[in-house]
């Protein structure tokens, strides 16, 4: 089974909130919340893929990122490699351009949302970040 390489963005605003989006029900892991992003196309860097996906999906222009972690997960029907970047420098207003629900959530409230299993490690990493200490 082929692995899908996905660029994932943990975008943090000045209020120390993280942007999440709800997956459409017809998508893999549909109905669950996620950190926006998308497939890395051949010839793209992870950050260039993330910039493209964020502009297409949530209308944000990403300026700079830092690597957070890479997660490899096998769902049984699909294998994913989540190349996760933290973004604190961006412009624009987040809007679900594909009719998906998007919202800014405080880190300590992320546990109130249901995420795909592969995102658990990302959630743990975000929780471990001390956003008030000026990370990224």
Image (cartoon, rainbow, N blue to C red):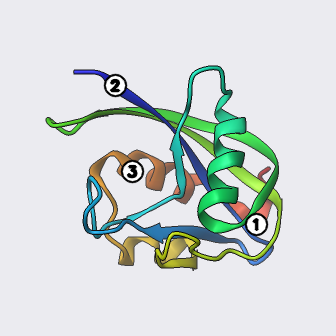
Q: Which residue is mark 3?
A: 119
Q: Mark 3: few, some, or many residues within 10 Å (few <14, many ≥20)?
A: some
Q: Which residue is mark 1?
A: 132
Q: How many angstroms separate mark 1 from mark 2 (CA)?
A: 35 Å
First reached walking from the N terminus: tag 1 or tag 2: 2
First reached walking from the N terminus: tag 3 or tag 2: 2
Q: Residue at x 45, y 56 (%)?
A: 123
First reached walking from the N terminus: tag 3 or tag 1: 3
Whether residue 112 is visible here, answered yes or no, is yes
| Residue closer to the observer: 36 or 116 | 36
Dot 3 lies on which element?
A: helix
Q: Which residue is mark 2?
A: 3
Whether residue 134 is visible here, answered yes or no, is no
Q: Residue at x 65, y 44 (%)?
A: 50
Residue 118 lies left or right of residue 127; in this view the side is left
| Residue closer to the observer: 107 or 37 | 37
The spot of residue 95 in percent (x, y) is 64, 77
Q: How many angstroms separate mark 3 from mark 1 (CA)?
A: 22 Å
- Quadrant for residue 49, please give it: top right
Mark 1 or 2: in front is 2
Residue 89 lies left or right of residue 77; in this view the side is right
């Amino acid at each position: 089974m082929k692995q899908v390489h996905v660029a994932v963005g943990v975008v943090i605003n000045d209020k120390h909130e993280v942007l999440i989006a709800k997956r459409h029900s017809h998508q893999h892991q549909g109905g669950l919340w996620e950190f926006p992003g998308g497939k890395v196309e051949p010839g793209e860097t992870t950050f260039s893929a993330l910039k493209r996906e964020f502009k297409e999906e949530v209308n944000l222009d990403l300026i700079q990122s830092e690597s957070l972690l890479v997660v490899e997960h096998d769902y049984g029907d699909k294998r994913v490699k989540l190349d996760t970047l933290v973004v604190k420098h961006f412009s624009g207003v987040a809007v679900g351009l594909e009719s998906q629900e998007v919202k800014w959530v405080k880190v300590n409230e992320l546990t109130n949302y249901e995420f795909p299993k592969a995102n658990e490690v990302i959630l743990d990493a975000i929780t471990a970040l001390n956003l008030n200490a000026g990370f990224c």
